[in-house]
Amino acid sequence: MNPFLSMEVQSNLVLASASPRRREILSSLGFEFEVIPPDVDESEIFWKDPEKIATLLAELKAVDVLGGKPRKTVIGADTIVVCEGTVMGKPGNREEIVSMLERLSGRSHKVLTGIAIATLPDTRIVEVETTIVRFRELSRGEIEKYADMDEPVDKAGAYAIQGHASVFVERIEGCYLNVVGLPVQRLFKMFRKLENVSSR
């Protein structure tokens, strides 16, 4: 258990995500939780506002899993990358990986992670964290070599900041763990709100 939160709010936790990075972050904080990947079709979300996309998907994932685990507290999350107004999800193939990296090269972009905490009867706490990341100029060879790796395949924006792509990053403004996939400080603030709701 995490020593900084009450037993009540961190008991019976479920992570509605298949992301191993999110599992690792939660585990490193001492949380005990079950992992259940949600069944949500992300391609059906057509909002133009990136914050709405991230928060809506996070909430949909949490609510989807809560439907099968009504006695649990479910955490849903969704991370997207936005560069010059273009929303970047997970690349579908090598060509999309190359295209995304070419767009990110030498530019700053935003990484947004929507987080939702859902529990019955009707508690929904949904927020978003934003981090700005700047890439240095990438050579064609670097882009091609990285595109041949497995690392960018399931990552928003086609890169993993905690992996080989760390050498692409010139600077970041904001929460590093947000770029990995789960902003810890934001999550703790949301758990504090849940504590306040639970104590009423």
Image (cartoon, rainbow, N blue to C red):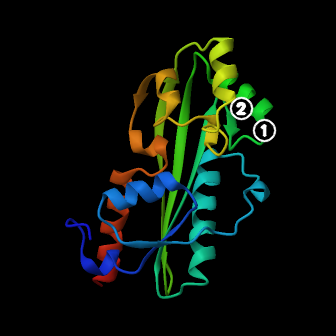
Left or right? Give the position of 105 relative to 125: right
Disc 2 residue type (three-letter) = Ile
**In the image, what residue occupies the spot 37% across and 63% down?**
190
Q: Residue furthest left?
A: 3
Residue 95 in percent (x, y) is at: 79, 30
Mark-to-mark CA distance, 2 and 1: 7 Å
User: Dividing the image into 4 quarters, which one contains the C terminus?
Assistant: bottom left
Res 187 quadrant in image: bottom left
Amino acid carrying label 1: it is Asn
Crowding at mark 2 (Cα within 10 Å: few <14, some 14-19, many 20+): many
Which residue is painted at 64% across and 38% down in the image?
150
User: Which residue is tagged 1?
Assistant: 93
On screen, residue 71 versus residue 196, left or right, reads: right
- Relative to residue 18, is residue 138 depicted above or below? above
Q: Secondary structure at mark 2?
A: helix
Badge 1: few (under 14), some or many (20 or more) residues near its Cα, within 10 Å? few
Rendering coords of residue 162 (x, y %): 45, 37
- Figure check: 140 above or below 127: above
Q: Residue at x 63, y 60 (%)?
A: 57
Q: Nearer the viewer, residue 104 or 124?
A: 104
Q: In the depicted view, which residue is nearer to us: 49 or 138?
A: 138
Q: Which residue is mark 2?
A: 97
Residue at 74 percent across and 26 percent down: it is 99
